[in-house]
Image (cartoon, rainbow, N blue to C red):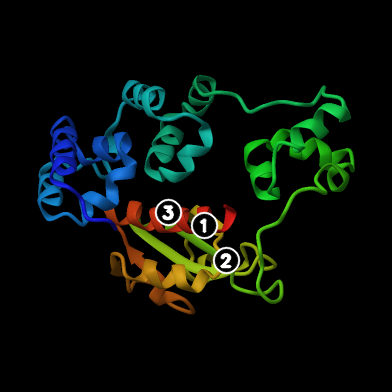
Amino acid sequence: MNKITTEEIIEIIELLNKCETKTDFRERHPELGSIVRYTEELDEIYRSLRQRRNSYTEWTEDEVLQHVNKNIKKYSELNGIPGLKRRIVALGIIDKVKEMLPRPKVHNKMEDEELFKIALKYDWHHDFREYDSSAYTMLLRRKLYTEATKHMKRKPRKGSNDISNIIYLWEVVEVPGVYKIGITSGSRHHARIKNVTKSNNISSDIIRFVDVGDARIIENKLKNIGETYNGFKGDGKTEFRIYDTWSLNAALDIIDEAVLTITT
């Protein structure tokens, strides 16, 4: 990380002083997380802010809807905020939340030529699937996907299909704040997650399951964050971590940065 200047520190202090809670600061300025974390005087101010961890369980329907309206741009973003998503489910307001957020693009009535034009906007299969899933699905159903995407590239792979290129992070639903990190190959999909949850009689709330190239490097970085949780048994038991909100965001930053690196 480049050395931060005095002027930049003063500007960030002003931003910190405008926030009442740690959550407010992270939501408004997610790009400043690593800078604050590794700058002593900024981290001290950050730690003085009130913590809002686990407060979602106490939110009323109006508070949830106001927060969604102000901070959430699309429904899929809630997958990264499991506590808020569980509160929405508990209040029975999923339909209200979906109505507030932009609807996904729908291309059901589009002609084949229009779908081909949409596909031409993307260079990577992954980006096409993520950002225009409706057109992606229609091309598959019409058996035109291969022809429409022949100009696209796939993420690079090393060795066979069984290389550990996938990093995953999921929260133990029964023990909030405890997360499981691990690696797998694209060919195994969610098999390892299912094995661990079954052997420990727990359920998972998957937060990330993404291709990062060499997943072992990312896994080792994630093991250095938070504390080890010793409450489970079997293979991979050392990969259960206790993450507070700050640790979780640090872990997500590492994963997302790795994904960005191999897709650009």
Horizontal and vertical percent for residue 262?
56, 58
Q: Amino acid at mark 3?
A: Val
Horizontal and vertical percent for residue 141?
85, 40
Q: Residues within 10 Å of mark 1 (few under 14, many from 20)?
A: few
Q: Earlier in the sequence, mark 1 or mark 2?
A: 2
Q: Which mark is residue 261?
A: 1
Whether residue 165 sits left or right of residue 176 in the image: it is right
Q: Could you give the CA–CA distance between mark 3 and mark 2, rounded to whole angstroms?
A: 28 Å
Q: Amino acid at mark 2?
A: Gly
Whether residue 225 sits left or right of residue 172 in the image: it is left
Q: Residues within 10 Å of mark 2 (few under 14, many from 20)?
A: many
Image quarter of residue 15: top left
Horizontal and vertical percent for residue 8?
19, 42
The answer to whether marks 1 and 2 mark residues whose Cβ atoms lie closer than 8 Å is: yes
Which of 195 and 112 lies nearest the eye of the viewer?
112
Q: Which mark is residue 6?
A: none
Q: Could you give the CA–CA distance between mark 1 and mark 3, rounded to whole angstroms?
A: 30 Å
Q: Is residue 246 above or below residue 197?
A: above
Horizontal and vertical percent for residue 63?
31, 24
Q: Amino acid at mark 1?
A: Thr
The residue beneath circle 2 is: 213
Q: Residue at x 83, y 38 (%)?
A: 139
Residue extending furthest toward the bottom: 235
SS at circle 3: loop
Q: Earlier in the sequence, mark 1 or mark 3?
A: 3
Image quarter of residue 177: bottom left
